[in-house]
Image (cartoon, helix red, strand yellow):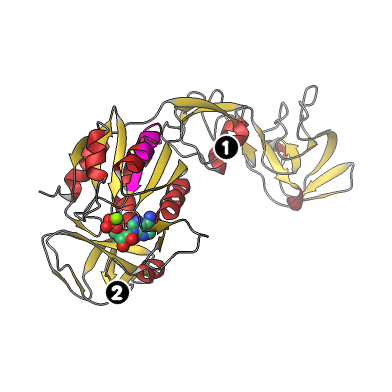
Amino acid sequence: MAESFESARGVILSNVSALDRESIALPLLVGRVLAEDFYAPWDMPRWDNSEMDGFAVRAVDCHVSVQLRIEGYLPAGGSGEGLSVSSGTAIRIMTGAPIPVGCDAIVPFENTESDGETVTLKQPVKSGDYIRCCGSDISAGEVMIPSGTKLRPAEINLLASFSRLDAFVFCCPRVAILSTGDELVAPGEAPAAGQIIDSNSWSLAAAVRELGAVPICLGIARDNRESLAEKIAEGLKADVLLTSAGVSSGDRDLVRDILETAGIQQLFWKVAIKPGGPTAFGLQEGTPVFSLPGNPVSSMIGFEFLVKPALLKMMGYREVIPSLHKATLKAPLRNETEKVRFLRVVAEQTKDGLLAESAGDQNTGILSTMIRANAIAVLPATRSEFSEGEPVDVQLL
Ligand code: AMP
Ligand code: MG
């Protein structure tokens, strides 16, 4: 019996967990997933400061056309110590400089005229104008980046702003990738008649790398016990093992047997999806092992919908199931199977929302449809006809 799609994904996710954490230096943190809650250690801004280059004034002094005597200069980085604004005076102040004693408003240069000794105000001023107050952005003790967040340049800026030189992030899964088949040759080798170039190793490695995990390509195992057993043993040293091909019911489809011999506890062998149906999942002492179909389109789709959520969970993400979007069909689609059907579609954002249509021939042997597609429509097993104008779920690629 094939596992349903939902239940297969549930089995996978309940059997993988986030990897250990490691401390990584600030310059290498981008793209990693934070493994601690980052609390702001102090208020931001740290002190009241000027939002503009201009003049620090007392709002009560400031009616239009008033002339104030310039009594000092306060650059960014200056402490402001010894400077104060008293009645009838102003201090020339730069953006970011601390607000001097007595001042309760900043007048930007563009709202003034100045001869260097005095400044004349061209516009009314209110108390609080152009002052960034201490803690107005971030309060001390606030959780600013929760654990499980991917660190983008913005988060890196925040960590650096609070002087963090390193942070705990989840370790990246090392994902061993094994292609299997007597017919395979590596790219660059001249294929003899009937031989097929191993492309799955490369698309799977690319998909792993794109997520931020680390692919380890084991090359090609031949369809015999020795070769498969040796490569599988090597692959089990990684955090995850992905194999492709050799799991259908062909004469030389030995992967299933060898995995059993290697002590892998199989949790399912087939999933009620198309493409990607002959996908198996098992565990060897906690190490997840995915056996994907050999067909390149099927292996990529199996990766997208079954392997990716597992890797995201191991990487420490809180959200691991990619979100589906609603797209309106430009033309009818059919699910001729009684399985969840993944159709390669072209989705286009328009003023009426997302529209989608088939990207071409949906035969799993057709790679060019995969190249044209920018999304996968996920059609439920329970219905066969999806009409023009109907909304369907799509996962953007
Ligand atoms: P199998 O699951 O072994 O029956 O393979 C199904 C189909 O996928 C066959 O046509 C294989 O030649 C092809 N195939 C298997 N492995 C790969 C690979 N690594 N790269 C490209 N095509 C493959
Ligand atoms: Mg084969």
Instruction: Assess whether mark 1 and mark 2 are in contact (beta carbons under 8 angstroms).
Output: no
- Residue at 64 percent across and 42 percent down: it is 130
Q: Which mark is drawn over residue 46? A: none
Residue 12, position in %: x, y? Answer: 25, 39
Residue at disc 1, secondary structure: helix
In the displayed structure, does residue 288 sit left or right of residue 390? right
Does label 1 point to a residue whose CB lies under 8 Å from ligand 1?
no
Q: Give the percent coordinates (x, y) of residue 314.
A: 37, 35
| Residue tagged 1 | 156
- Label 2, on which residue? 361
CA distance separating discs 2 and 1: 44 Å
Res. 170 image quadrant: top left
* Residue at 40 percent of width and 70 percent of height: 372
Question: In the image, which residues are magenta?
Answer: 230-243
- Residue 73: quadrant of the picture: top right
Q: Residue 186 at what x, y percent from top left?
A: 47, 56
Q: For this view, does 256 lie left or right of residue 78? A: left
Q: In front: 35, or 209?
A: 209
Q: Is residue 146 magenta?
A: no
Question: Where residue 83 sits: x, y (%)?
Answer: 79, 26
Residue shown at the point (17%, 44%) measured from the top left = 7
Query: Could you tell whether 135 is left or right of 88 in the image?
Result: left
Amino acid type for the residue under numbered disc 1:
Ile
> Are there few (<14), some (14-19), or many (20+) residues within 10 Å of tag 1?
some
Residue 52: image quadrant is top right
Inspect this view and state whether residue 193 appears: yes
